[in-house]
Each structure stands twice: as structure tokens, then as C-alpha cells.
Amino acid sequence: MSIDYPRAWQIVMETNPEDHHPDCSFRVTDGAILCDCDILNKYPETLDKKMHTKIKKKKMKCENCGIMLSPDKIFSYVDGNNIAITKNSPNLCEKCYRKIYGEK
Ligand SMILES: [Zn+2]
Ligand SMILES: [Zn+2]
């Protein structure tokens, strides 16, 4: 796995030097040299996973009938030609979506 440098720096800046291997260049040089321990390889994955679960855990409400739904059950009207419509379209459950937009 390879990460581009700016991204790699961004990641190590968010970590604590103590989290790194005692021999890691980042820790030894106090942040002067880019990390060369496994933190860098592990971190993006953990970070992405964390963000993923955060988004997935958040339940959403159907704005029409108020039922709570997991995000993958939410229907939202998407207009490829007008992003404003997509942005403003309410989150709906499947039932309400069909009621409002019809079967398409
Ligand atoms: Zn390191
Ligand atoms: Zn609904």
C-alpha cells in the first residue's frame, strides 16, 4: 500500500508521537522525518473505518412520516441535471418516496 506524501503527513500530524514505535523516525526526530513504522499503514484504514461506522450508525428520519431508518434505507430524490434539487430533496422512506415521486 502506498500513500502520497501530503496525505501521509496529514495522517502523522493527527497521531501522537507516543503512538509510534520507539524507533520510528517520526518519533525519534520529533516530527522532522516522516513516520516509517506501521502506524502510517494502519492509520488510514482505521480512520476510514471509524468514519464509516460513524456515518452508518447515524439513523435518519423519514421527513414525511417520521419513521426512523438506517441510512441505506433512505430514499432521496436525485436529479442529475440539477444538483440543487438533489440537495434540497427530503430524506424519505421507500413508501413515502413512492407516494411522492411515483414509481420510476
Ligand atoms: Zn511511526
Ligand atoms: Zn415515510
Image (cartoon, helix red, strand yellow):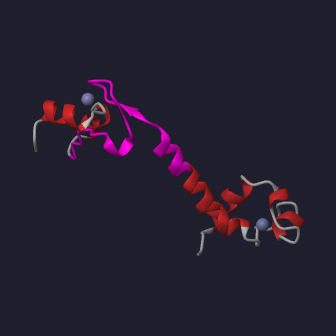
Q: Quadrant of ligand 2?
A: top left
**Is 40 located above or below residue 83 in the figure?**
below
**Is 60 located above or below residue 11 in the figure?**
above
Asked if the stretch drawn in magenta spans residue 26, the answer is no
**Is 25 located above or below residue 63 in the figure?**
below
Horizontal placement of 37 versus 74: left or right?
Answer: right
Q: Position of residue 97 (x, y in %)?
A: 20, 35
Residue at 83% over, 64% down = 32
Res 39 quadrant in image: bottom right
Considering every residue shown, the one lying at the far bottom of the view is 1
Q: Position of residue 28 (x, y in %)?
A: 89, 66
Horizontal placement of 71 versus 21: left or right?
Answer: left
Residue at 22% over, 47% down = 80
Closer-to-camera residue (84/98)? 98
**Is 54 located above or below residue 66 in the figure?**
below
User: Where's the C terminus, which quadrant?
Assistant: top left
Res 65 quadrant in image: top left
In the image, the segment drawn in magenta is 51-80
